[in-house]
Amino acid sequence: MAGPSIGTWVKVRNKSGRMTAKVLAKKYGGGSYQQGEVITQSEYRSFQKKRAEAIADSEPRPSPGNAVQSDKKASQPKSNSRKDVDDWMTSNESPPKLLKLKTTNKPEKLTSVNYRGYQIYYPPTSKGRENAAFAINALATGNFPEKLTKSTKRIVFTDQPNKKDEYWAKKYNRPNFKSQATGGDGIVHVYNGGRIPKSTMAHEMGHNVAQSLWGSFHPPESSRYGQAQKKEPPVSKYGASAPGEDFAEAVKLYAVGGETRKAFRLEFPLKYQAVQELLE
Ligand SMILES: [Zn+2]
């Protein structure tokens, strides 16, 4: 089973002691961060550097940038710095429109930008923009396989909950279940005014890959991944909740790259091969 070393939420504190960010992280060079652990910005920078090195070490893969840079109409921020992303969003976003999403209950005013072929919708508020900028950064630096990114066309941020939360609460027997994000129909929805880290983005895109391949989140028994599921256990605790979740979790472990991907390859060789065959 994938243990806690795969990744965990930590908080980053800046010099003045103010909490600045919550990141999904793994301690490089031994050990794991504890859930919710507070680390300093310099620890976080060293983690980022080591992670970038680990990802650079793994086999080269096309990034979403490489995949769609041929789209000449699509402009993009000058750099991934917060200021350049903000400036670019401000000058490229469409006027807000009242939209009724399939996955929420009430119509909602959303604006959007087109980033490298992804239409990204968000509430026209500073928090909405911040969440969208965070996703843009995840897409810019995710280095996801092209076949993973192709299956997703839209990323939608909403301040509302997923209208199916109650259903999942019963199904998973978790009374307070709240969806952070969902995939499906080539869309990634992000709920409750929240953010989506790279790893969750990859997971939800994994559902879109499954749907475009098989018309269902659930890998068919005849597929290579379906066969691997008979021989190897779920790749994570959440993956144990449903075969489709196991597949999305496997896609996540693969797409995150670096040491996470290496651990996935070692622990679940059949699933790794099946995912590699689908994404490369
Ligand atoms: Zn899922």
Image (cartoon, rainbow, N blue to C red):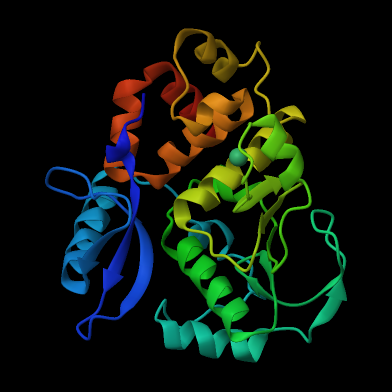
- What residue lies at 45% left-to-right and 16% top-to-bottom? 233
Q: Is residue 188 left or right of residue 27?
A: right
Quick check: 70 above or below 254? below
Which residue appears farthest toward the top when viewing the image? 231
Front one among 38 and 247: 38
Which image quarter holds the N terminus? top left
- What residue lies at 50% left-to-right and 35% top-to-bottom? 249
Quick check: 168 above or below 34? above
- State the image coordinates of residue 259 (x, y, percent, origin top left): 26, 41
Quick check: 248 above or below 267? below
Q: Is residue 199 visible?
A: yes
Front one among 224 and 205: 205
Q: In this view, does 110 lie to the left or right of 98?
A: left
- State the image coordinates of residue 22 (x, y, percent, origin top left): 38, 65
- State the image coordinates of residue 160 (x, y, percent, origin top left): 73, 64
Quick check: 272 above or below 136? above
- What residue lies at 59% left-to-right and 15% top-to-bottom? 226
- What residue lies at 66% left-to-right and 33% top-to-bottom? 210
Query: Image quadrant of residue 125?
Result: bottom right
